[in-house]
Structure formats: C-alpha cells, structure tokens
Amino acid sequence: MAVGAARPDAYGRLIRPEVLASLSNLELIARTVVDGAVMGLHRSPFFGFSQEFAEYRQYVEGDDPRFVDWNVYARTDRTYIKRFLGETNSHLMLLLDASASMGFGSGSVTKFRYAQMLAASLAYLASHQHDAVGTLIFDEQIRDFRAPSSRSGQLHAVIHGLDAAVPARRTNLQQPFERFRDHVTRRGLVAVISDFYCDPEAMVQAVRPLAYQGQDVVLMQLLDPFELRPDVPASTLFEDMETGEAIEVSPDFMQREYRGKVQGHIAALRAAAVRAGADHLVFDTSEPLDEPLRQYLMFRQKRR
Amino acid sequence: MSLFAPLFLLGLLGIGLPLWLHRLQTQNPKRMQISSAMLLDPSERRLHVQKKLRFLLLLALRIALLALLALAFAQPLWKLADRAPSGVVGARLHLIMIDASLSMSADGRMAAARAEAARIVDGLRSGDRALLATAGSTMTLVAADGSAPTADKAALRRALEKLQPGESRFEYALAIGSIDNLAGAGDVPVVAHLVSDFQASGIAQRFADLLPRSERGRPIELQLHPIAAEAVPDWAVVGIAQNAENIDVTVRGHGTPARALTLQLTVNETVRGEQTQTLPANGEAMFRFAGVSLNVGSNRVVAQLKKPDALGADDRYQVVLQGGGPQTVPLLTADTRAQSGTFASAALAVSAARYRASPTRMADFDPRTFERYRWVMVDDVGALDAKLAASLRSYVESGGAALLVAGQRASALQTLPVSGEAVRGATVRNADPLSIGRVDTAHPALMNTRGWQNLSIVRMLKVTPGSGDRVLVAAEDGEPLLIEQHVGTGRLLLLCASLDSSWSDLPVQPVFVSFMAEAAAWLAGDDAYGSHQVAGAVLPLAQAGATVGQVIDPDGHELLSLSATHTAQSVRLERSGFYQVVTPARESMLAVNFDERESDLTPADPALLERWRSAAKAAENVAPAAASAQSSPGTLPLARWLLALAAVLVIAESLAGNWLLRRNTKVLT
C-alpha cells in the first residue's frame, strides 16, 4: 500500500477516525466501521461459513460444545470436534501494543485510540464470521490476555478489555510474545497492532517463533500522519514518550532526513517481517478504518 | 588606586543578566512529545549538544566579560608569586647575620651565637631558604653552596660550626644596609636575623640608620637575637705614644674593678720593660717607659698585658715608631750657599715634618742614590743637566716624588726638564706685584695651609700646564704658581717661583712653613695610610701611589696574589698586628689594632633593643604600603590587562553570538 496516499473519492462515504473516536462505545464504533465497510463490498468472498468437512480434532476446554461430534463420542467415548473448511483458521488473536508511544497523536485520534478501534472492528468482524477472537494487550509486560473464543459474550469481553487499556510504559515484544506462544498453541491468525518503534531484528526474533508455530502473523503498523510527514517550523525539542529522552532537532532534518528514516524503518520492518514469515501492513491513523479491514480481509483470503 | 575602587566589584552582580537571558533563551525552544526518538539522527543529538555547548560558551564569554570589567574598574593588584625555587607561596628568605667582631671572642659568645643560629635554622619552614653571613667590618656570605640561598639545614649547620670570630668591629649600620643586597634579586619576603652580643658602645641612639630598607619594595623583617645578657669586665691597651725619650702606654678598663695590672713593652721583639700599676675601678692608667731608645727607621713597639682577661685580643697593642730623627731630603741646587737652601731647611725644621733639607750641589749628586730618599727638592729646575734630569724623571716615574722650583735659568728654557711643561717666559711685575687669585684647598698638600692671599709676586715663570696637570695655586692673572703632576706612579710639584725672596715673598710668609710641611707629607706619601690602622680598615694602595706592590700580613703571608699585585686598588686589613707594605718606591710598616669600642663588653639595654625592634616593626609595616602605592615590583596592577582581555572577549563574544545566530537563521529558513 502506498502509505499516506489520499483517496478523496472514498472519504465521502467513509467515516473519519476522529468522528468515530467521538463515539464513546467501542462496540458501536466497531459495528459502524464493519457495517460500513462490508456494505461497500458488493460480494464478499470472505463472509459466511464453509460447511465442507475438514478434520476432527480433540475437544479442548473453551471449544463450543455444539460442535462436538456426539456420534464419534458414542462410538469411541471420546469427545471430538468436527471442523469444517470455513473454520480452519478461524482463530483471530489480536495483540495490541499499549506502550506509551502509542499514545502519540498529532490530531484528536491517538495511535492507541485508532488501534483500539481497529482491534474492536477486527474482533467484531471476526465474531460475525464466527471466528474465535482473543486479545493480548501488552507493553513491556502482558497487561490483559483473553484466550480466543467464539462463545457469545466473548466479543463484549474483548471490546471491554480493549476499551479499558491505556497506553503506558515501554515496548518489549520479546516477553509478551513468549508468553503468548505458551498460552496459544493452536494455529490461527495473529494480528499485531503496534507502531513498531523497535529494532526490526528484535521484532524478527519475537515473531519468527509464532510463524514456526504455524500462526499466520500480520503486523499492523500504525503511524500518525506527523510521523509520516513531520512538519516543524523551528527547532523543536522532541521528548521520547517512553524514555523521556529529549532531543532538539532542526526543522530541516525533520522535513528531509527524518521522513527518509521513517520510510527506511518501514522498509526494514517489512523485510524483517518477510524473514519472519509474517505480513506487514502500515496504516495512517488519519485514514478511515475500512482500509485496514480490507487489508485484513485480503490477508485472510490470501492465507486460505 | 581610589579608596572606592573595590565598590566596582558590585558590578559582578551584573552577571545575573546574561544568566537570566540565557535561561529565557534555553527555555524558549518548542517542546514536543514524540513516540520514539530512535529515528532521530545521532548527528542531531551531537548538534544539540554542540548547540548547548555554544550557548554555554556564549554565556561564559558574557559572564567573563562582565566580571573582567567589574574587576578592571576595581583596580586589583597582583602580588607576584614567590620566586623561591620550591615554588611554595609564602616562603621566606632568612638572612642569618652573625656578629663576628672581636667582642664575640669573649666569654663563649661565639658558641652562643652558633647555637642561636642553629635554632633559627631548625625553625625554617618548608620552602624557606636561608643565607648565612658573618658580619664584621664587612659582610661575608658563609654558605655551603656558594652564595646562593639554600634550604639544606644540614649544610647550614655545617657552615655554622666553622664560624670563628674576627678582630674587626661590627658595623650595625653596614649590616642592616647590606640586607637588601645580600638577599639578592627577587621580591621574596626577607627575614633578617641579627645574632650579636649587641654592645652598648656600638648601637646608635637613633635608629634611622638601623632600619632595613628594600629598594625592591619587598618586606624585610628584622629579628634581633642578643646572645649576651650581662657585662663582662675587660681591660684593654688602647694606645702607645712616643714622647721624647719616653713611651707612654694607656690601659683602660671597661666595667672592671680596681686591680693591679702588669704591662710588658716590647720593641722589635725585644722586651724593653715591664711595669705594674693598679687601675681604678672602671678607669684607665698610663704606663710610662722612660729612656727607651729606638733604632733608626721603623720600630715595632708592642705593649702586652701579662694576665689575659675575658677578651685576650685587646690585651695587646702595637705601633710603628720612627727612630733616628728626621729623614734627609736632598735639595739639589747649583749653589748650596743660596737663600733657597736656607729657607727650605728652616721651613722643614720648624714644621712637624720629619724631614730635613740637605742642600747638595747638582754636580756632586750621584743620580744612583735617588732611591734612598722618599722625595727630593730641586732649586731652579733649569739648572739640571740632561743626565740628572733623566735620572730624576726615572726616579719619579717609578714611584718617587719631587718638588721642582723654577729659577733664573728655567725662564730661559722652552720646555722644563723632568716635568715637560712648555715655558712661555716669565712674568715680571716689579711695580705692581701679583697676588694669589685661586688656591685649591681641597688638595692634601694645601688642605692645612693658610695665608696665600698675603703673597706678593714680582716675578713668575709662565708655563703651560699639561693635560694631566692640576693647577693648585694660580696668580690673580690666572698664571699657575703651583702645579701638581703625576709622572708614572710618582708625584711632582712644580713651583713657578723661586725659593728665595727675589721672585716673591713666599719664603718669608708664614704659609711657607705649613706649605713645606704639607707638601713634604704629600710627596712622601705619609698621607696615604700613615703607620696605624684599625682592624677591618681598607688600605688604599692606589692612593699611596702603590698600584704595584705587595702587602704582607702579621704571619708573613702575602695578601695579594701575583696578578693582584698589578691590579689591586686596596687591601683590607682584617687582623691586628704588623703589616709590611712593599712598593717599588719604598717599603713601609703598618701597625693594625682592634677598635677600642670592641673592648667594652657591656650589652645594650634590653629596653633599647626593644625600641629598635619596635622601630623596625613599624618600618616593616610602612614599607609594603609605600611599595604598593608606588606599584613596586612586588605587585602588578592588573587593570590594564583585564581591560585588554575584556576587549578580546568582546570580539570573541561578537563572533560567537553572530555564529550562533547565523546557524539558527539557517535552520529556520
């Protein structure tokens, strides 16, 4: 995607993030986003069930008992879940970065608020696809974890968890991802929503085990328009929101070199994601949320 | 420096202004939060640090500028650092002067002085240096390492152990006046220690000459270390006089009780008598030795007390007495029956001069005998034949002396023999005699003559003085009557009138007698050093006309080295005893005795010393203030340097400010 490319023709029917952010209910926001986005799709190749049998697997706690194959149970006295093609990758795990850097926003919508809305929308979309949805909110530690589930009420729980999170502290991918691998062993979709201000190699080290585990990982990098297109009229003292380090930089540097560095960092992340077996998507937090949803659906389609 | 100059230091409060402005400026940059600073260029970090440093540099320059201006107007003075080799600020130079006069040999005073000096050496602080000097008639540096100040206490103690008292007198004023020179160059504070018995006879009641002063403006602290607390009785032989056939010896007691003393008289190392007399308490007595015959010429006469007392050196006194009556001086003349011989002989006979004129015909005189005489007279120098004139010239050139008198035959010559002056005829004033116009009474030969103004001159030889001649007496018309001339190492006096009464009435005037006596003494060189000196005195060889010669001390040692015999101008007579002065012209003997004041061993009143200390302390306090007021070498006015530095800082501040502004402008555009 061309980051930051404006599409004025689409803005007429899409709701801008700042308008969505004014809605206090995150579930309402998700519903609005998803419904609006889906209505825009003439024919969704990604929506609905596929009833084609795919496999049996051992019942594990948390599985919906409605999908237990009671005939098999009667014959073998073991509980198996009958899985269909449409639900082979039906687990969506949302990993939300809640570090302090996500609190940055040059407009009324911070990156974290955008991430909340995006995560809620993805959860809502997945929920309507009967995918199991779980969340893991982290900074340098795991702040909230909800295992993937498709039970009713999971969506509310997920959205509530997202809504309650506030950005703070530093980012550390390594430790939360290790804990995530310990708790979630089943293959599925893993969407990591973060600004990814980290060393690309460190990101590779954190994500690569997930790919080895069979997870389909998509890295959703959220960047504020100021970060993509910084514009300062005079020398400015920038203060790192995580470390507190203050550096005075010239506008000349911000307008020229810094943009190149951001693009270079994005490219490095993308290359690192490729090496880790993950997809990398970059979103401008000033753009409507339907684009991330569309990208997600394309990613979901691609992994089939 | 104004009294209120220090108030300009309040200008330092102005430093607050750039501090405040800097604080405002550094707070101005817009602050903004950013997700992460990891993508900010490290060079921008350096740039930021550099910018902060530049701001700090600018701030420092501005503060320094204001501080320098305030300091410059306050007119500070920089006290120059101690130049001691140790580099220790506050170090001092200790000048330890030890009295080495004759009195210090009494009653163990020298040992006490050494102990006191050792105590001073032990008290030297770190960085202090010391100079050790003995003080007598001269100041002599005694140091282990040349004459340089040293901090080596062991070397100083070793030097102390070798100190011995001398026989000269301690000149307090000389010692005090030498402090500044002995301390050498530099402005290190000096502490002068004077270790002495402080004889009451030696200290002046007026302290003006006893206060140390420094031409360099450095402080000099004077510390007195008296080592004798009580008076010690002492008898001393203080004089020997020849009175006809008698020799009188004077013995004096200082703080002494009445006591019988025995005195021995020795002439030319032969005991000629011994007498015992009772001296009154603290009094004196004269021992008369009658009928002591002396040899012709110089006789070594010594008077010695038989029983030594506290100060043994002053129990002996020696003089050189002349025996054998007046010495003969040849009067070379063409006619021994002429009046000139009569007048000259009569004048010398009635004067106190120890010379007798012996008229001798020039034709009968053997020129080889010139060397026998201290000086000679020539009546009518024009009558000298060439051979005799050459011999006389040679005699004078080698240190002899002559009184040349003009006469009838001299007026016919164009150039005078021996002296060589050009003759321009003769002045004849029979009707209107000339009187004397000018007399050089500063000359030793005329110093004690009176009555030249009464002279009447009817005839006078007209000569032109040479370039080195000195006109001592001139007639009213300016023509020289008496001329002094130095020929080689000898002396000449040329009288342009005859010794008889046909040319002038000089021979019959009273001034003639005194003139002949003084001229005889001067020509004989008796005025040079006499026959008696005080220990520590300087014998002026040059003044004696003996620039080539040798002096032999009482032990028979030559005082001058071979090269010095040609160059030495003077010799210091440090010891008492008989000295022999040998010059090509003559050989003479000299008696050197102690200074009588050294015999009085009564120490000065402690109250007097205390007043001396107080006066020295007051002078010490006044000196630095005066020195600083005159910007002495010890302090350096800093105002002009500070202003110069401020000017440099103004330029630097302008450049730095402009540079910083240019960078900011470039960034903004």
Image (cartoon, coloured by chain):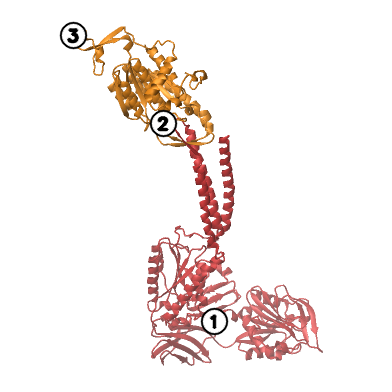
Chain colours: A orange, B red
Label 2 or label 3, whichever comes before in sequence order? 3
In this rendering, do the residues under marks 2 and 3 share a single chain?
A: yes
Question: Where residue B215 sits in the image (x, y, percent)?
Answer: 55, 68
Chain ID, mark 3:
A
Crowding near pointer 3: few (<14 within 10 Å), some, many (20+)?
few
Q: Nearer the viewer, residue A219 or A125?
A: A125
Instruction: Name the residue nearer the viewer: A128 or A52.
Output: A128
**Looking at the rendered structure, which numbered label has been put on residue A74?**
3
At x 26% / y 16%, what residue is drawn? Answer: A64
Q: Is residue A104 above or below residue B55?
A: above
Q: CA distance from mark 2 to mark 3?
A: 54 Å
Discs 3 and 1 lie in a common subunit = no
Q: Assess disc 2: are there few (<14), some (14-19) or many (≥20) residues with their C-alpha within 10 Å of its C-alpha.
A: many
Residue that badge 1 annotates = B531
Residue B47 sits above or below residue A130 on the image: below
What residue is at 49 percent from the left and 90 percent from the top?
A: B248
Q: Is residue B465 left or right of residue B160?
A: right
Q: Nearer the viewer, mark 3 or mark 1?
A: 3
Inspect this view and state whether residue A215 appears.
Answer: no
Question: B310 or B493: which is nearer to us?
Answer: B310
The residue type indicated by label 3 comes to: Ala
Number of the label disc, if any, that sits on residue A103: 2
**2 vs 1, front mark:** 2
Chain bearing tag 1 is B
Q: Quadrant of the C terminus of chain A?
A: top left
Please identify, in this view, whether the residue under mark 2 or under mark 3 is nearer the observer.
3
Find numbered disc 1 in the image and state the secondary structure of the residue it sits on. loop
